[in-house]
Amino acid sequence: MFQSHIVVLIAGLFALQMAVVCVVLRRSAGMDRSGLTSWALGSVLAAMAAALAAVQELRPLWLVLESSDLALLAALSVMAVGARHFAGRPGRAAPLLALNLAAAAAVAWHDLAPQYLAVPPLMPEMAPLLTMCHIALLLDLARSAWPSVPATRGTGRLAALSLVLIVIAAAAINAWTVALPLAAVMQGGAWPRPMPWDGELAMLNIFALVGVSVSFALMAHDRLRRMLERRARHDDLTDVLLRGAFWEELEAACLRAERQRKPLTVAFVDLDHFKAINDVYGHLAGDSVLRHFAGQLRKNFGQLEVAGRLGGEEFAILMPDTALEQGRLACLRLATAVRATPCPSEPDPIAYTVSIGLAARQPGEGADALMRRADRALYDAKLKGRNCVSLHPAGSEAGTDGGAADGHYITRGQPRAAS
């Protein structure tokens, strides 16, 4: 069986490994403000606490008894700051730094002043106070991680839940180990120095820090994974779904509507004379118009609707549980809002309009056929002079539509040329 100092050194090695993991995650794009730097530093301090605990076990006279507790306090403080940043809360680094400096000064005075200055210590014992600080910081970690439990799914939720359970268990054990000696002191007894389970408590705290570091790294990895998945599915310029992601949502919505026998309406939107906007105002202004229109989409449609950019200035809107007339009214509101709200630009705002084609899904109809009918409706809107909403009614013959005959409909893999 390993001796206790070997076990605590193994825990320190695990802590160093977690510091490396946090540094690697920190170098990923978009993770620079996720608190990973603080957690890497906290893991290094936890490894330092393990080394101090091992030295205390082998050479008790080399260090003061509270040296590993001070290192643990510093590690917990830095991790608490990182967890707050990860959760979007204020970090409070300055108060925690002051707490650590005050604790180090108090421990130094308590252990060295009686030897060299012949003055009594300020407090009978420092261990209970340091343990109380550990408990408070552990509970603060749980408070920072708890909102992630209901807000995430899968790995992220499991990691956040494990972090909360670990810190609550560690805080409870710390409270229990200090409660009995503290009760004895309150009854007139003396604080045991060192406590019989002091080494075991140090090992518990270090392993707890390693455990919460693993949980936090999994939370950060889950955030990074979701961020990369979003980037792979969303357009960088407009923050709406890309073509492939929109088609996946459309096909799934068609299957769901067929199974549940609910209505489904699709709108095909084209920004009128967008090439002229690029030619007159420049491509940067054209990008601003696209972003402005995406903002109007988000403002005028609720969370249940799905918007995608199919290419260039062409967008599509997926409206589940929406009949054709409801979709027409929603698209009219969108077209009116776009016409009444020019895109801010210098020196003058850029006014633009949109043409919209609508189609409601018929029983047994797939995504390709539905989008073809919406595109024919859009072609009709352009023939009518643009800046309007056109419908493709149910039961229309595909072969009699001029738009289809001219090949103006969109397919999944082939975007239409800009108009």
Image (cartoon, rainbow, N blue to C red):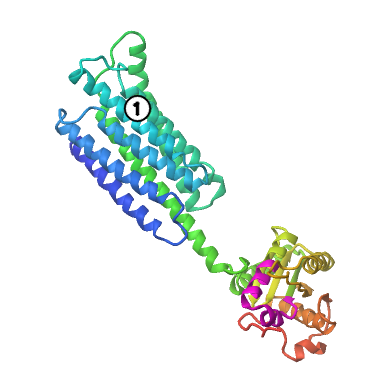
- In the image, 361 versus 305, the foreground residue is 305
- Which residue: 44% across, 55% down? 32
Where in the figure is residue 158, as x and y percent of width and height? Answer: 47, 48
Is 226 on the left-hand or right-hand side of 132?
Answer: right
Indicate the quadrant where residue 239 lies.
bottom right
- Dominant SS of magenta comes to helix
Where in the figure is residue 375, as x and y percent of width and height? Answer: 74, 80
Q: Residues within 10 Å of mark 1 (few under 14, many from 20)?
A: some
Depicted 222 relative to depicted 107: above or below: below
- In the image, 191 versus 126, the foreground residue is 126
Q: Let me know if residue 415 is in the magenta part.
A: no
Q: Which residue occupies the extreme bottom position in the image?
A: 406
For the question of whether residue 194 can be seen, the reply is no
| Secondary structure found at label 1 | helix
For the question of whether residue 413 can be seen, the reply is yes
Depicted 161 relative to depicted 155: above or below: above
Name the amino acid, label 1.
Leu
Q: Quadrant of the C terminus?
A: bottom right
Where in the figure is residue 172, as x and y percent of width and height? Answer: 41, 29
Where in the figure is residue 149, as x and y percent of width and height? Answer: 52, 45
Is 119 on the left-hand or right-hand side of 419?
Answer: left
Q: Quadrant of the N terminus?
A: top left
- In the image, 240 versus 161, the foreground residue is 240
Q: Which residue occupies the extreme front position in the image?
A: 347
Depicted 127 relative to depicted 3: above or below: above
Q: Which residue is mark 1?
A: 130
Region of the chain picked out in magenta, as a range: 270-293
Is 27 on the left-hand or right-hand side of 404?
Answer: left
Indicate the quadrant where residue 278 lies.
bottom right
Q: Let me know if residue 281 is in the magenta part.
A: yes
